Amino acid sequence: MSRALLILSYGAPQRQEDVLPFLRNLFAGRNVPEERINAAVQKYERAVQKTGRYSPLNTECQNLVAGIRQIDPHRPIYWGNLFWHPLLADTVAEMQQDGIEHAVCFATSAFDSPSGNQRYADALTKAMNAQPPIIIEKLPLPFAEPFFIESQADRLLETPFASTPAPYILFSAHSIPLADAARSQYVEQLQFSCRLVIDRLGSDIPWELVYQSRSGPSGDWLGPDIKERIEQLAAEGRYRSVIVSPIGFFCENMETQYDLDIEVGECCAGLGLFYHRARAVGSLTKACRMIAASRIAPPGGVVKTHRVVYDSKQD
């Protein structure tokens, strides 16, 4: 039997009464000002007014589990979250009750960053201290995996990017502090993935990597900001359409639903630009196949794809 598989994500509130407790979990130990928490609450409230739901993330994870089960129906598959139910600790307890001693984990973060990939790794290290002991090995980041790249390209192909007038492609990822970016390969990996997607599409449409959902001063966080860049494009007058690919987000979540669909959508409408937004990879069949087939690198080695091998020095 294949090792058990754990899908690990952030989690998201599904009801009004869950929003504040979720945010308290998310910001615990980070000395976040109360006004920032209140602003986040208002963001969820506006998202519900506009879309009728709080966040699609939990549904995305459930669909991901279901998709992998269709490919590997005999493999034990579990789902846990860092900040909302089902919480990782509860999922690990369920795995122990089922007699699972060894599992591999796919975290819904495709790129290296302290706020994403590292938080998942730290949570898994803590989870393995539970009794009875359980070994959970985190799968490699999939940013250069062929199925990941193909899935990103397929999502773009679902948009009318090739037929919309005077298009410009913006690949979007979550902004992080410059200090965090300097001690990770976040930017380099994102740029690498973007180039692979464009190569896969065989497109000559201009593109660039931008950032969204910034939580601090612009001078201290990665840019350019997506809305500021769209305003610049509109001022230049060369492009009539903006196509956004949320490459930095494996699943649909509040940042794609609110920041891209609502805020960026309103920004483009106000500037008279056509706007098309590709969906996150999520539970596309190729993505599910990638996760089902993923494996842990041997001691001292690396897992290499059959088409591309990332070299951090090439950027």
Image: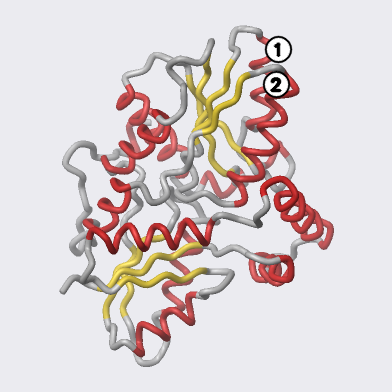
Residue drawn at x 45%, y 53% as measured from the top left = 109
- Give yes or no for contact between labels 1 and 2 (Cβ–Cβ under 8 Å): yes
Q: Which mark is residue 63?
A: none
At mark 2, the secondary structure is: helix
Type of amino acid under label 1: Ala
Label 1 neighbourhood size at 10 Å, few (<14), some (14-19), many (20+)? few
The quarter of the picture where the C terminus appears is top left
The percent position of residue 82, horizontal first and vertical second, equals 53, 69
Closer to the camera in the image, 255 or 266: 266
Residue 9 drawn above or below residue 311: below
Residue 203 drawn above or below residue 33: above
Residue 234 drawn above or below residue 113: above
Q: Does residue 267 appear to the left or right of 286 in the view shown? A: right
Q: Does residue 132 appear to the left or right of 276 in the view shown? A: left
Label 2 neighbourhood size at 10 Å, few (<14), some (14-19), many (20+)? some
The percent position of residue 51, horizontal first and vertical second, equals 67, 47
- What residue did someone put label 2 on? 231
Type of amino acid under label 2: Glu
Residue drawn at x 32%, y 71% as measured from the top left = 77
Residue drawn at x 37%, y 17% as measured from the top left = 203
Closer to the camera in the image, 299 or 160: 160
On the question of residue 96 being in view, the answer is: yes
Residue drawn at x 47%, y 60% as measured from the top left = 118
- What residue did someone put label 1 on? 235
- Residue 312: name its quadrant: top left
Q: Report the Cα–Cα distance between label 1 and label 2.
A: 6 Å
The quarter of the picture where the N terminus appears is bottom left
Q: Residue furthest right?
A: 35
Residue 228 drawn above or below residue 168: below
The percent position of residue 167, horizontal first and vertical second, equals 52, 16
